[in-house]
Amino acid sequence: MTDTMRNILYFGFVALLILGTGIFSSWNSALFILNFGLISAIMALGVNLQWGFAGLFNVGIMGFVALGGLATVLVSMPPTPGAWAAGGTGILLALILGAATIVAAVLAYARLPVGKLRAVGVIAVLVIGFFVYRSVFDPAVGAVEAVNPALEGYLGGLGLPILIAWPVGGLFAAGAAWLIGKTALGLRSDYLAIATLGIAEIIIAVMKNEDWLARGVKNVSGLPRPAPYEIDLQNDAGFVESATRLGFDPVTASTLWVKLIYAGLFAVVLVVLFVLVQRALHSPWGRMMRAIRDNEVAAEAMGKDVTARHLQVFVLGSAICGIAGAMMTTLDGQLTPGTYQPLRFTFLVWVMVIVGGSGNNLGAVLGGFLIWWLWVMVEPIGLSLMQFFTSGMADGYWLKDHLMESAAHMRLLTMGVVLLLVLRFSPRGLIPER
């Protein structure tokens, strides 16, 4: 069997899984899986760019995804009335003072002579700058968070179309990745993993605790949408007539139509990013990155700047994850920092890349769809199987209760089994790198 035929069979199988979900479960569930599968495939592309191309072990994926979600609030939500007048200027001034303090500390370190004078000077700059920063920042934050705290209590955004937030989310993630890369990319792979995970947790902690930024754990709901609202479609006589003519209930038809619009937008983004990443892979730059991945010492001996190339690919991969994070928050319609868990945005995406095929962009896309379908459908399928196997047992029997309670753990069990099977029988993934 040729590689092309095998790949067609793989993607055909995944398509049948999604179609089967629509036929035997519901089309709403099938489109939900399709939409999040598209987003997962984009995340997997970003991680594959870092790991498959350059061998960078990044486990801070959720931090970059969260920054993409934050961008949707800062770009698309309207400004909060009265918040800027109450303390917005003070917050901006405090942030400028904080940045100036860091710059002053760096300059002091660079220009003062080595010795106690340098240490004292840098510490003095940081301490004085910190207290000046807090003296401006704290009152401004208190004033902003006091503005209608039950519903707002934050600065709001720019009120721009939410589609603009998608590339902005990529820029946010790229900026954070550049700062992280400048400090952490010189570390060994295991230390790089620890550093990226720690910084991702810091990003999430800031989003949870700084209410003035995006309401923290109070969440921001009612984000603008690139698709019409279902209720508007249900009140549209033309749409209702078309849905009725096709044999659909208008309520169901409106939900399906909105999800199809999202699927079309996400598919366009996935195709554009896939084409760009494929062109990068087959370019001299892509061959250089794989050469660095396979043997850094030899590549450096040939005159390649390994650290600069690592920083480059780390920023690009993180930007793709930021775009996916903005898309996911748009689909959810709200920003909920408490949902950014490592299990969902780190472990799951890494399983997608490993199962699909590290170093192969087509494999990353396949892994994104396949693993997400398993993640969503395994639990209800497992519950149905447990109900079937225990149908002959009496209610209240200890074994039946135990098996029914264990159905909730089918997701983790299945992920582990799939990962073990792939590593045993196809260690380079379902679609391995050539």
Image (cartoon, grey):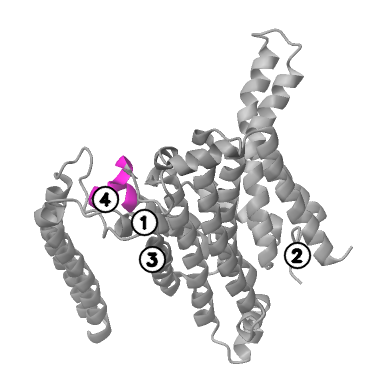
Which of the two discs, 1 and 2, sits closer to the camera?
Answer: 1
Mark 2 falls on what kind of element? loop
Range of the magenta residues? 206-218
Mark 3 falls on what kind of element? helix
Residue that appears at 76% across and 20% down: 389
Are dots 4 and 2 in contact, CB under 8 Å? no
Q: Of marks 4 and 2, which one's residue comes earlier in the chain? A: 4
Disc 3 to disc 2, C-alpha distance: 33 Å
Residue 287 point in image, percent of width and height: 66, 82
Q: Of marks 3 and 2, which one's residue comes earlier in the chain? A: 3
The answer to which of 55 and 235 lies nearer the viewer is 235
Give the amino acid type for the residue marked by disc 3 in the picture: Val
Query: Residue 432: which numbered mark, if any?
Result: 2
Residue that appears at 74% across and 69% down: 433
Mark 1 falls on what kind of element? helix
Residue that appears at 69% across and 33% down: 24
Query: Residue 168: which numbered mark, if any?
Result: 3
Q: Is residue 391 above or below residue 113?
A: above
The rendered magenta stretch, by its main secondary structure, is classed as: helix
The residue identified by callout 1 is 72
Mark 4 falls on what kind of element? loop
Give left or right: position of 110 versus 283.
left
Give the amino acid type for the residue marked by disc 4 in the picture: Glu
**Which part of the image, by quadrant, shows the C terminus?**
bottom right
Q: Of marks 4 and 1, which one's residue comes earlier in the chain? A: 1
The residue identified by callout 4 is 210
